[in-house]
């Protein structure tokens, strides 16, 4: 059964120490204005400091004659673990007293917290990132001094800091590359190609590690494959280039220009997919063309969404797709600036850009359908952005190695900063979080 986690600011409470015969129980509380709610049923024996955090001694009346003292630690929003008011009531570990405190809390609108819900709130309020959440779990679970030390080290930045460091390094490198660009006419070099190569290589290694780490946690490459296919010269590569916003695939008036598959990872509206430009379909005339055809056929079988492009004889190769699910087949009549296509097809022109946005919308809708939701899950998103960052860094590496224009390098680095920023500073909210946080105990 799916456990429900409320992502709102409602009031939650839980025992933070295991129940038993210890001398003290800790009741942990958080939520919007949680402190006000708690103070409404406690009497304070010491003065409430005006600080954002502190300790006061409080008393709760059990009945007309009896009362119990407790220590009340508080952290006001936003300077707390969860980002909301947090209060810890340290009370004698007597089940009747503890139940009594809970009953007063429930009267005030508190509800019992789900496992990991405190940490979930910390995460959602930007207090910890996914890497830290994992480290917190390991700290809680650590059973030996060694594993505890390791987990604490990780929490202190073993995983999270390197990513921030990569982002910092990226920004510094970008600044140097842009300075090189600014001074290029004066022949002044702020950073050498060797140094750039070294730095990009180091960053690549870090991001590869992150991707591997995610994969080892079962966050696979769930991206949807979208293939552009159709007769030769139909304008597939031109369309591909428009969709990936760049000249990535070779375009020419000669049929049979594309011989290999050209792929590009894309993120549109938080949906990740791989766009593939394939060679044109025709009977193989020589061995190389035959191989290209075989490759394309294999790729069609492996693809989730087929975008069939034709500029004339529109129905000619449609029978080719006996194995394609009609639901995931988009028919595109290309070159609409000069060609007439069937009315019920999507009409596009890579020259006038007519129909491009409409095609994108249709692709996104099918990607959503394939994924079964309107956006990727939190960890899949992290994986998606890590993959995009990796692509940027690989292309940056290629730019330096093959002495491509500095502007191209700067472009890739800029995109890498943006994509990485989605991991280090982004809030992920979906039900995969639920799975992740349910590994925690209640009260953590
Ligand atoms: N008028 C017009 N010409 C286009 C359009 N799209 C592509 N072309 C031209 O059509 C020719 C073939 O374009 P490509 O994008 O290489 O076609 P392709 O389907 O990838 O071709 P192959 O890789 O050989 O199968 C080129 O000369 C393009 O300039 C368009 O929307 N309008
Ligand atoms: Mg092509």
Image (cartoon, rainbow, N blue to C red):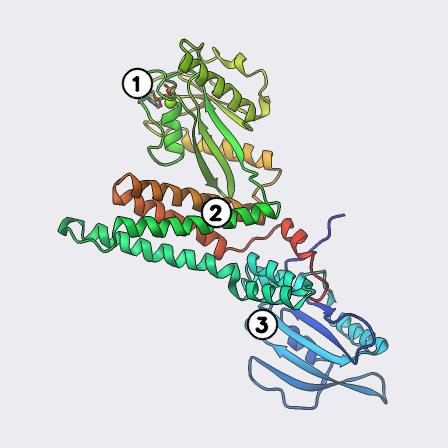
What label sits on residue 253 in the rendered view? 1
Ligand 2 position by quadrant: top left
Q: Residue at x 57, y 56 (%)?
A: 130
Task: Give the mark, 2 or 3, whose residue is nearer the N terminus.
Answer: 3
What label sits on residue 208 in the rendered view? 2
Can residue 342 be spotted in the picture?
A: no
What label sits on residue 80 in the rendered view? 3
Mark 3 and mark 2 in contact (Cβ < 8 Å)? no
Residue 350 in percent (x, y) is at: 35, 27
Q: Quadrant of residue 53?
A: bottom right
Can residue 331 be spotted in the picture?
A: yes
The number of callouts visible is: 3
Rounded to the nearest whole Å, what is the CA distance between mark 2 and mark 3?
33 Å
Question: Is the CB of the residue bearing disc 1 within 8 angstroms of ligand 1?
Answer: yes
Determine whether, in the image, residue 327 is placed left or right of residue 400: right
Mark 3 and mark 1 in contact (Cβ < 8 Å)? no
């Amino acid at each position: 059964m799916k456990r429900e986690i409320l992502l709102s600011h409602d009031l939650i409470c839980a025992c933070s120490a295991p129940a038993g015969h210890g001398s003290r129980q800790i009741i942990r509380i958080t939520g919007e204005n949680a402190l006000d709610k708690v103070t409404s049923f406690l009497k304070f024996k010491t003065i409430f400091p005006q600080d954002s955090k502190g300790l006061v001694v409080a008393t709760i009346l059990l009945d007309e004659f009896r009362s119990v003292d407790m220590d009340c630690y508080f952290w006001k929003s936003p300077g707390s673990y969860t980002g909301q008011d947090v209060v810890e009531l340290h009370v004698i570990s007597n089940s009747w007293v503890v139940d009594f405190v809970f009953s007063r809390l429930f009267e005030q609108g508190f509800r019992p917290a789900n496992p990991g819900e405190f940490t979930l709130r910390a995460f959602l309020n930007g207090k910890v990132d996914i890497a830290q959440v994992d480290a917190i779990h390991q700290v809680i679970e650590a059973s030996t001094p060694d594993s505890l030390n390791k987990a604490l080290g990780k929490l202190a930045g073993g995983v999270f800091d390197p990513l921030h460091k990569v982002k910092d390094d990226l920004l510094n490198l970008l600044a140097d590359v842009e300075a090189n660009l600014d001074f290029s006419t004066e022949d002044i070099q702020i950073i050498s190609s060797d140094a750039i190569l070294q730095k990009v290589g180091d960053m690549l290694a870090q991001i590869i590690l992150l991707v591997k780490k995610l994969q080892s946690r079962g966050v696979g490459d769930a991206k949807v494959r979208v293939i552009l296919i159709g007769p030769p010269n139909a304008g597939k590569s031109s369309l591909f280039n428009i969709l990936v916003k760049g000249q990535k695939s070779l375009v020419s008036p000669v049929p049979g220009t594309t011989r290999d598959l050209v792929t590009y990872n894309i993120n549109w509206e938080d949906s990740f997919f791989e766009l593939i430009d394939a060679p044109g379909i025709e009977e193989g005339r020589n061995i190389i063309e035959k191989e290209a055809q075989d490759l394309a056929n294999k790729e069609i079988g492996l693809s989730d969404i087929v975008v069939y492009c034709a500029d004339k004889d529109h129905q000619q190769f449609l029978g080719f797709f006996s194995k394609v699910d009609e639901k995931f087949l988009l028919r595109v009549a290309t070159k609409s600036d000069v060609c007439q296509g069937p009315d019920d097809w999507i009409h596009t022109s890579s020259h006038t850009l007519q129909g491009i946005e409409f095609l994108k919308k249709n692709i996104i809708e099918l990607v959503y359908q394939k994924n079964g939701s309107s956006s990727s899950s939190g960890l899949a998103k992290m994986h998606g952005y890590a993959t995009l960052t990796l692509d940027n860094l690989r292309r940056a590496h290629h730019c330096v190695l093959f002495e491509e224009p500095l502007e191209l390098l700067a472009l890739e680095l800029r995109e890498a900063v943006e994509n990485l920023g989605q991991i280090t500073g982004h809030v992920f909210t979906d039900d995969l979080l639920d799975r992740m946080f349910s590994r925690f105990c209640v009260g953590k």
